[in-house]
Image (tube, coloured by chain):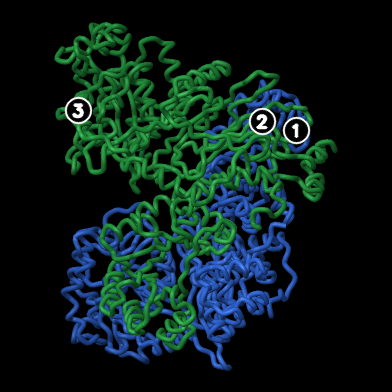
Chain colours: A blue, B green
Amino acid sequence: MLETYNNRALLVDLYELTMAAAYFEHRIDCRATFELFVRQLPPERGYLVAAGLDSALGYLENLRFTDDDVRFLREQPAFRTVSDSFFRYLRQFRFTGEVRAIPEGTLVFGGEPILQVTAPVAEAQVIETYLLSVINFETAVASKAARVVTAARGRPVWEFGTRRAQGPQAGVRAARAAYVGGCAGTSNVLTGYLYGVPLAGTAAHSWTQVFPTEREAFQALLDTFPETAILLIDTYDSLAGAETAAKLGRKIKGVRLDSGDLLEKSRQVRQILDRHGLRDTIIFASGDLNEYKIEELVAKGAPIDAFGVGTDLATSRDVPALGVVYKLVEVERDGHVEYKTKFSEKKAHWPGRKQVFRFSRPVAGKGKGGDGREPRGEREEFHHDLIARASENYPEAAPLLDLMMREGRRVDARPTLPEIRSRTLWNLERLPERYKPLHDGPRYPVANSAALERLLEEVRKHYVIAPEISKASRVPADAAMSETLVFLDVDTQVDFMDPSGALYVPGAETIVPNLRRLMTYAGENRIPVLSSADAHQPDDPSFARWPPHCVVGTPGQRRIPETQFASETVIPNRPGSFRPPTKWEGQFVIEIEKTDYSVAGNPNFDAIIAALGPCHFVVFGVATEYCVRDSVLALRQLSLPVDLVVDAVKPITEEGGRRAIEEMVAAGVRLVKTEEVCAPAPVATR
Amino acid sequence: MLETYNNRALLVDLYELTMAAAYFEHRIDCRATFELFVRQLPPERGYLVAAGLDSALGYLENLRFTDDDVRFLREQPAFRTVSDSFFRYLRQFRFTGEVRAIPEGTLVFGGEPILQVTAPVAEAQVIETYLLSVINFETAVASKAARVVTAARGRPVWEFGTRRAQGPQAGVRAARAAYVGGCAGTSNVLTGYLYGVPLAGTAAHSWTQVFPTEREAFQALLDTFPETAILLIDTYDSLAGAETAAKLGRKIKGVRLDSGDLLEKSRQVRQILDRHGLRDTIIFASGDLNEYKIEELVAKGAPIDAFGVGTDLATSRDVPALGVVYKLVEVERDGHVEYKTKFSEKKAHWPGRKQVFRFSRPVAGKGKGGDGREPRGEREEFHHDLIARASENYPEAAPLLDLMMREGRRVDARPTLPEIRSRTLWNLERLPERYKPLHDGPRYPVANSAALERLLEEVRKHYVIAPEISKASRVPADAAMSETLVFLDVDTQVDFMDPSGALYVPGAETIVPNLRRLMTYAGENRIPVLSSADAHQPDDPSFARWPPHCVVGTPGQRRIPETQFASETVIPNRPGSFRPPTKWEGQFVIEIEKTDYSVAGNPNFDAIIAALGPCHFVVFGVATEYCVRDSVLALRQLSLPVDLVVDAVKPITEEGGRRAIEEMVAAGVRLVKTEEVCAPAPVATR
């Protein structure tokens, strides 16, 4: 069987083996925990469907180095300086560790560990390459399939892509992953043989061409397959082909269209078939299809009964690889745990073993507004995820990582493939519609637990890496041209900015020239501006901690003149006060009222972000360690790129500001200066 | 070995086997010839490097259906109506055919058969899926590798992508294909084992993290691998890492940078290393690299000695699949040959067995202008390819398709992998620089032989498919937004257009209102316009066939006022008369003088096309079957999309015009009307 051929032990990057050798030679046998995750979802994906776990566990169970493998390695120049005992160790090598993972068919998001390995460090290292590759690829294809299946709205989608897959073996795994993602089946026979996936097929143009006439070709196929043949009718002219088929006077299971305008052709073919009484003959469509084309065909009412999707599905063509990584997060040595992270630019990760908690909430029955007055239905929807330390517990949420393998053996029976596919469909049903559009939209919220954030801070202290602004500002902008540049002006209100204000941020007035420059630049370049503004009632509970400030109707609540625009819309802090414009007219400038530190506290925030489309934020204002920090982290949780203008923010305390900046940098924020932002071309398109 | 595991016979689309069954049941055992080719190069590729042939031939040699395979197939519902004798046939199935192919490591272009199979029709059909998949994938990666290697200008490029490949097996084939494309080697150990590809590796961030300090991590690695270790220095801070490494006081083979601004970091690291006398320590760079980033780093003089390239290379990320197809071109039955094609929209192909002829010409020594006065060097450059019928012979050109397999067995020993790699490098050296920029540029010319064109015309007559203009005009525009829309106005000169002209095209004056409308539209939308114009000397040899017309300096040679612009540049019909503008100013409007039918006869034509960048042509003028036809086909040979404005062209004879339009449609031209072109938004961006 394809799954059990030899030599998978050598299907590994050389450095995994040289590191294993060096661990062995230095008798380093601590237990290490690595986590495998996708740093950030690509812009084209709002969710992923976990897949590849079965491949990963099968590999771990059977991993052995043969004599031949070991002999080959010994001959490599790289291993010349390695002792014999390492090769004896390799010959005995088994994976003896523990694996936790999110089951196949579960939706996962950026930053969430899909798989977690705890094992002696050399073992945990050697398996990296293979695990990354199978999870990366199968998750990519299952996720793509879920999008295509969603677009087809109940019409079956068949995977037809082996011929354009990245090699025939990739075709087999892609076909399995497509089924995991919700496809009806595949044309790949071996996938049927190995995994019981349903098989389908039609006929090729060559079949028709071999016969003197199309009619004879159709007849011959129906003679051999009277009940199952699907006739390909577009070798010469699809309408003439449909007529020819219909006039045979036989029952025909289906016809396939593989070219031309599928909407118009399918309508005409349907008419021809119906006119000849072939109302049960299905129309099968194929030909470079993907979720976007299928969505359009379905929306326009094309009478297509089933879709065959090839290249785009089998290669996840628009996202052929996910940014999947395998990172050391913890080492246990002599009973003592060390938490691990690293600080390479843009490549930092969170330390410690984690668990992902998924919070759901019941939603009102179908078609109801969900305003609380409707009777609640039975249905639950996913509400948000929390990435927490493994030791935390949230009884109201579902933990996603399950123990899959202990001491190198699977702890449970493998789920069947139909079970996995059902899990995918169950998950997709529970993801709110707004998080699964095919095009860009709001991102499903994923937060880190406070305990995890504290752990990062502790680990960081060990390494004393203070971000130097001058260094960070050299990082080149990598914003995509298609992202809208948006300014977020945080709480530049009189009560904070003015020395006489009720909650004056010390020195805030010194950043006013930069604020003015930023706002002028925004006006000149028609950059959308969101201005957040505290808007408290006189009895706001936060006044227990802070002096009363920014009370609605008082002069101190107003924003300073330097950050105001002539024409602004105010979005009050209550649901439904923002209506997305149907058409952009003029510059998009709004004031978002809030009572929380974070601008995301305004219930309209998600809708505003959705209206902006893909965007890249430039943030400034006060105070660095409260409203700026919380708003920035909220943006980062939505995976939005953020530049913080370091000379246009002010903290309440220096120490608080410094720590907040470190925290934001760790969350992927880029530090910039006003003069960089206001360079001749807008930042996002430099 | 990976190559010989079982079950490859089932690694096939179901329909290949159902068609085989139906051929068997109908006793259809004609010999069929299929050709495998890429219809058109994707915009991101100026050439392809043929690869995957070894996989294909290995598959064909070993293809067998086991008892298990056959048992599985019999159980499938699709095969319920198939007789037992077919399954006995399958059990005995061998590939017994003939294979011709372009050797791995050879450059190939759009439309050129890479592989040609002649075999009993069922055999030739069954192998389709596997052959497409291996040639598609390995050619895609080898081609990507050649681009990356070209960008690195002599610095070694190592393939590091297995972890992000489309499954580990794809990683092995990608690593081999990357080596075929010119890479120095790979990190994939199995590829070293199976094919002898050189191996390289460094260390991971986790290695550094496991140790209490970076210094200890470096020391430990150097203890085990004193001569080969490459230290990864960016786990915490790459400059501090470089200092730590340099201060160890040991010889170090190399250091690796995997994050941040590689240009600046490599410069600073080089300084640190040099300051500590480590002048021989190489700097190895990695981290989401591709040919564009490497080109920029090399151009800016980054002191990087070697590159590791992963995801982009192993998945050919920007072009994860080529549009490779496998088409029936010929059937031999009872000693009689039938030529095959089909007419599906955009999916037509050329009938008959083909050969590809590559014409080269000697070029002057390096750095010489090649103006003929310099002594000619030894070097030859590829000049153009001709796709011809297999029976044709061009002694001055190299035929590219070689006999590889006869009666199912390889005819020659397999070339070694280093030989294949050398062939790639030899080929790349011979492709003129102008055809291998990383970004868009002129396309290497590929033409069809006259005999092949005649054959298509004969086959077409058999099927009597007259294109209906009303139908073709419904085809939706699929021009990419990034293509420039360009108008080509063909020979709208007084001698052709005016009833009193020397070579009046009957009824030409009736299209003048449409010509005026098109030109007005071009002016309003600043669409570049190329106007071709016959410019003959009084003694032009073509005046033997045609009455003297369009003689330079006569009023009849001028273009009619309706197609003239106020400001035009004339490009005379001699080399070097066109200089690409360094900056676009105003609208690009030129008159291209010519003596041939085709505007491409002007020696400046390629330079003009190159100056325009990727473009989409809208063509009109006279006469349909001569200058319009030849100019359009020349554009199509450059793979440029062409719309023909059917109500703004005129033929000399109705029959000639009709045939010319059929021919252009077969070559992929879209038919449009003036009012569609002049719709509110430009055609190319609708």
How far apart, in angstroms, are the residues tagged by discs 2 and 1? 9 Å
Q: Residues within 10 Å of mark 3 (few under 14, many from 20)?
A: many
Q: Are marks 2 and 1 in contact (CB under 8 Å)?
A: yes
Which of the labelled discs sits on residue B571, or is there none?
Answer: 3
Residue A67 screen position, x and y as percent = 67, 69
Q: Residues within 10 Å of mark 1 (few under 14, many from 20)?
A: many
Q: Looking at the picture, does residue B23 appear above or below residue A575?
A: above
Please state if A590 lies on the left or on the right of B449 as rendered. Answer: left
Please state if A490 lies on the left or on the right of B225 as rendered. Answer: left
How far apart, in angstroms, are the residues tagged by discs 1 and 3? 60 Å
Q: Amino acid at mark 2?
A: Trp
Residue pointed to by mark 1 = B22
Residue pointed to by mark 2 = A207
Secondary structure at badge 1 equals helix
Query: Residues at marks 1 and 3, common chain?
Result: yes
Q: Quadrant of the N terminus of chain B?
A: bottom right
Residue B128 screen position, x and y as percent = 63, 40
Which of the labelled discs sits on residue A146, or is there none?
Answer: none
Residue B406 screen position, x and y as percent = 64, 34
